[in-house]
Amino acid sequence: MADDLGDDDYYLQEDFSLEPTNSNETKVKTKKNKDKPSIKRPIGSYSDLVTTIRHFYKKSKSEYELDELLSIYNNSSISAPSPSATSISLDEYLNELLAKGKWSKQADLSSAPVVLIIAQSALRCIELGKTLKNSSSSKLLTFHYLFAKHKKLSEQIDLLKKPNTLFNIIIGTPKRIDDILAEKVVNFKRLKFVLIDWNYANVKQQRLIDLNQLKSELCHLLCEQKVLSKRFFNEKTRIGLF
């Protein structure tokens, strides 16, 4: 079951910046944006995530506490396979990770995702959702959005409590996912993968990990949400970057 916010509704309500005062300025700004070179970065790896966690907690935790925390994430067994190619689409990557039978197993469990996808913004969540919706495997890749834009937390909690809220994938932003997990309305019995939209960069060439607030929220979600860290510790759920 997909989220009840339609793609068209989202784009109609999206808040864009003010228009410039004249057409010449529009042309100059448009040309400047088009000519701006993209930043070439290496593809993110699981070791990059571990390094990020280490650096983030280095000042707030003792050496003993940090080693204890990293003992979970230094375990290569919880590292999911990387996409087979840099140009691979999200739906193709998901099909590489899981056989079709895994998607349908216990599919009648309410609010019980097989995959949790973490993205940097509501807009990016919508883009990823469109990819899954247009996939040849769309009947299996059912998804539910969790982000704050145009959605009250209480409304999302109420929807997830309903017995007929069925989906295989959650696509959301770190803070909203964290807030939802704190309410204990998501069943993680089926959760196989947590996938981080690591390599995507927005129009300002910023990845999720380049934004300090999002980096903080991501680390908190992965390391301090006990329901996730316990699954990582028990090797029931793996982490992938794409």
Image (cartoon, grey):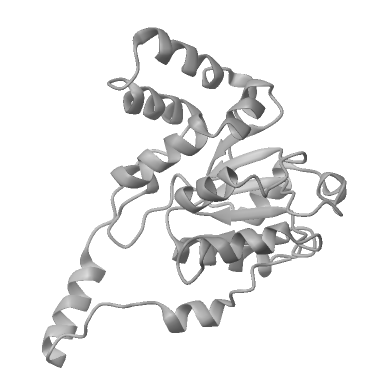
Q: Position of residue 126 (x, y in %)?
A: 53, 67
Identity of the residue drawn at 51% across and 66% down: 152
What is the number of callouts on the image?
0
Residue at 36% across, 39% down = 216
**Is residue 44 visible in this depiction of the protein?**
no
Q: Quadrant of residue 198?
A: top left
Which percent across, then down, holds residue 143? Answer: 68, 60
Residue 38 shown left or right of residue 184 in the figure: left
Using the image as rendered, state which of residue 213 and residue 36 is in the foreground: 213
Residue at 60% x, 40% y is 194
Q: Choose between 210 and 172: the one closer to the eye.
A: 172
Q: Residue at x 44, y 36 (%)?
A: 220
Kindly give the residue lying farthest to the bottom in the view shown: 22
What x and y, as percent, mark residue 43?
43, 39
Residue 20, compared with residue 32, is above or below; it is below
What quarter of the picture does the N terminus occupy? bottom right
Nearest the camera: 241 or 111? 111
**Residue 47 appears in the figure:** yes
Instruction: Indicate left or right for 234 with 216 as reference.
Output: right
Q: Farthest residue in the top direction?
A: 64
User: With respect to residue 168, does 17 lie above or below?
Assistant: below
Relative to 167, 83 lies left or right: left
x and y, in percent, of residue 61 in the image: 35, 18
